Amino acid sequence: MMVLACERAITTEQPSYMLVLALAVALVTEWAVISVSTDVPCAPRSYGPTRMVCVCNSTHCDTVDKPTPVPKGRFLWYTSNRGGLRFHKTTGDFLPTVAPRGLRLRVSRSTEYQAVVGFGGAFTDAAGINILSLSTQAQYNLLKFEPNTIVMRSKLLKYLPARSLSPRVFCSRSYFSPEGLEFNVGRVPIAGCDFSTHTYSYDNIPLIKRAQELGNKSLLLLAGAWSPPPWMKTNNDYSGFGFLKEEYYQTWADYHIRFLDAYKMEGLKFWAISTGNEPANGIIPVNRFNSLGWTPYTQRTWIAENLGPALRNSRHKKTKLLALDDQRFMLPWWVNIVMSDEKAAAYIDGVAVHWYWDGLFPASLLDYTHDSHPDKFLLATEACVGTLPPLHASFS
């Protein structure tokens, strides 16, 4: 999961990647880079030969200014690489001839796939705890608050239960503002998750409005639950091998609607909601964080008979429903089983995917899923580093 913390970590365990954003309308032949970035640069901190983060503290915070269109015949690109560049901006000119050596990019406007929904992060307990651990000035630099409006722990207590101290705070200047990454998607756990300090059920309302105020677009909020309260489950626990009791299928669906209702009362509207975080974790009893087990068959029934109708018959009927919310290795077979029920498929708008174990399961599984269900969009909803050993596989 992309946790909003005091440092934006970019790991380069995988081969270096270059992010190219060509803003010129032209066919790519060959180019020459002629200028460098004027953004506030990254203050690097090394965590080993292949790990480096950009530090935002009380005296410095790097920025990525909003790009402006460049004249015809020119291009703008951003580079992050193993050598230490992080969103390094350069501009250049397209040349009329092709050099003997170099990189050639071909752009086909007639070949289209799904639209890019956006990029974002997660409003987790871990994000709030890390941000509130910073000094006042560091919070100001990171969050772009005026000093007299910085929300400290004491003010959050009026919204949060004292036992949890789990402030799902707003936003980061580095992430949401026009001078940052302009994140436009925010994932919100429904109650506790594996980025919480303890297990708990739905009992607080995060404060996300500041993120909406910082961005120049509407923030798309995506919700997902890790586990229902233990009394709804077969194992009477938040985690471990456990499933939803059939007599609570409708109750759990209604719980999601009540969650959306509560946020709406706070002026927060959700763009999408998922069928639940990582259903495989409730079948493979090796974790000790909130989880709920589903098989594709039982989840298909719950979507078709309970969650789907409850959502579409509520005042949140325009909220999108995302299936799976689990790993790539469950594609496309899990989705195919769920979609085999026409009633369930009619309620589903997209498929949520996580990135763990991607080193063992090729990206072609995403293609198979898209080709099987071209009317359902794919969205990556969770990614973090440090939880698993490096995984590498050959795709030749």
Image: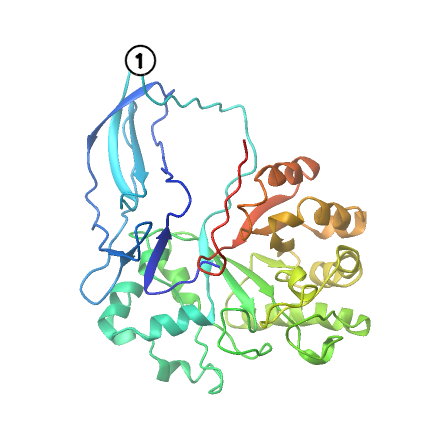
Above or below residue 163? Residue 269 is: above
Left or right, 292 with respect to 159, comes to right
Left or right, 280 with respect to 43, comes to right
Most foreground residue, 308 or 187: 187
- In the orientation shown, which residue stands out farthest toward the bottom? 162
Q: Position of residue 237 (x, y in %)?
A: 67, 78
Residue at 53% over, 41% down = 393
Left or right, 316 with respect to 308, comes to left
Label 1: element kind: loop
The local crowd at label 1, few if under 14, some if 14 to 19, many if 20 or more residues have their Cα within 10 Å, is few
Quarter of the image that includes the C terminus: top right
From the image, tell me which residue sits under label 1.
100
Residue at 32% over, 14% down = 98
Residue 23 shows up from this direction: yes
Q: Position of residue 378 (x, y in %)?
A: 59, 45
Q: Quadrant of residue 143?
A: bottom left
Residue 218 shows up from this direction: no
Q: Position of residue 241 (x, y in %)?
A: 70, 70
Instruction: State the scheme by which the image is colored.
Output: rainbow
Q: Quadrant of residue 172?
A: bottom left
Q: Amino acid at mark 1?
A: Pro
Q: Position of residue 223 (x, y in %)?
A: 57, 62
